[in-house]
Image: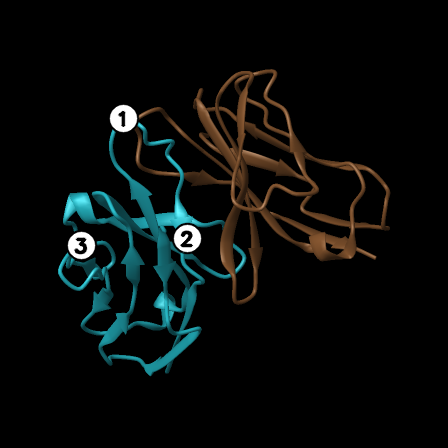
Chain colours: A brown, B cyan
């Protein structure tokens, strides 16, 4: 089944403890992206990647890192999480030239 | 600046009533507009896009460049339409990074 898989679904951590949220897609998509969803603010883009080894900042990149060593994987790294990064995170992918974004099921992160 | 505005956080209607979810955008070029939907406990998914001029699940949306709007409409709401709806914008052209800008989202609640 074609899909975008995120792990974990839920994560509770403490301030300053490094964490990684994984994202993998099995559709051979070139474009991948991370969003955070906050009440009243909608979806905001954190980072995106047009292809392997090509990443760029979105609208709210501060405090996050990403890497794209392989086409299928696009992990989101929080080196030193802070409480303002408590949010619902979505990974998404699409093919080059495609209009439709495929979303993962989301990761609810709480930073205490 | 590129911006998508959904003025209503919550829209509550009775089953069978008409629905209009408002979306206004700001974009200097030629935009592509989309509606994404998130049903309870499900991932975000594409509902429709203005290029296709299609009707999905009874919903339609017309791009009005004069009013810079892309309102989502359905003549008779159903309970299963209850969900969070996001309007999104993407820029066309060779420089298009595929970045989608999302509005703040509108929760549609259809009461029996």
| CB within 8 Å, label 3 to label 1 | no
Where residue A78 sits in the image (x, y, percent)?
74, 39
Height in image: A17 above or below A44? above
Where residue A62 sits in the image (x, y, percent)?
66, 43
**Residue B94: which numbered mark, if any?**
1
Which one is in front in this view, the residue at disc 3 or the one at disc 1? 1
Q: Same chain, marks 1 and 2?
A: yes
Q: Is residue B83 left or right of residue A53?
A: left
Q: Which of the two discs, 3 and 1, labels the residue nearer the N terminus?
A: 3
**Residue A2: which numbered mark, if any?**
none
Which one is in front in this view, the residue at disc 2 or the one at disc 3? 2
Which picture quadrant has residue B52? Answer: top left
Q: Same chain, marks 3 and 1?
A: yes
Residue pictured at 54% horizontal, 25% vertical:
A55
Where residue A16 sits in the image (x, y, percent)?
86, 44
Which of the two residues, A95 or B23, is positioned nearer the viewer here? B23
Chain identity of mark 1: B
Q: Is residue A87 left or right of residue A93?
A: right
Which of the two residues, B48 or A44, is positioned nearer the viewer here? A44
Q: Which residue is mark 2?
A: B102
Q: Secondary structure at mark 1?
A: loop
Q: Which of the two discs, 1 and 2, labels the residue nearer the N terminus?
A: 1
Height in image: B67 above or below A102? below
**Disc 2/disc 3 C-alpha distance (Å):** 21 Å
Chain identity of mark 2: B
Q: Same chain, marks 2 and 3?
A: yes
Height in image: B68 above or below A21? below
Q: Secondary structure at mark 3?
A: loop
Which picture quadrant has residue B20? Answer: bottom left
Q: Is residue B66 left or right of residue A105?
A: left
**Disc 3/disc 1 C-alpha distance (Å):** 29 Å
Q: Which residue is mark 3?
A: B55
């Amino acid at each position: 089944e074609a899909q975008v898989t995120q792990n974990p679904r839920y994560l509770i951590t403490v301030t300053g403890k490094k964490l990684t949220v994984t994202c993998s897609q099995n559709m051979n998509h070139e474009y991948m992206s991370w969003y955070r969803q906050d009440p009243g603010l909608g979806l905001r883009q954190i980072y995106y990647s047009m292809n392997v080894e090509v990443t760029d900042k979105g609208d709210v990149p501060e405090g996050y890192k990403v890497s794209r060593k392989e086409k299928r994987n696009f992990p989101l790294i929080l080196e030193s999480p802070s409480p303002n990064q408590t949010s619902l995170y979505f990974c998404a992918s699409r093919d080059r030239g495609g209009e439709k974004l495929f979303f993962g099921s989301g990761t609810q992160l709480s930073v205490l | 600046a590129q911006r998508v505005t959904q003025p209503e956080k919550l829209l509550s209607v009775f089953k069978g009533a008409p629905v209009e979810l408002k979306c206004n955008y700001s974009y200097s070029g030629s935009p592509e507009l989309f509606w994404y939907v998130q049903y309870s406990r499900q991932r975000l998914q594409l509902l429709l896009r203005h290029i296709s001029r299609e009707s999905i699940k009874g919903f339609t949306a017309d791009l009005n460049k004069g009013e810079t709007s892309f309102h989502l409409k359905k003549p008779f709401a159903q309970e299963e339409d209850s969900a969070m709806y996001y309007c999104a914008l993407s820029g066309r052209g060779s420089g298009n990074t595929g970045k989608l800008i999302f509005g703040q989202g509108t929760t549609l609640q259809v009461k029996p």
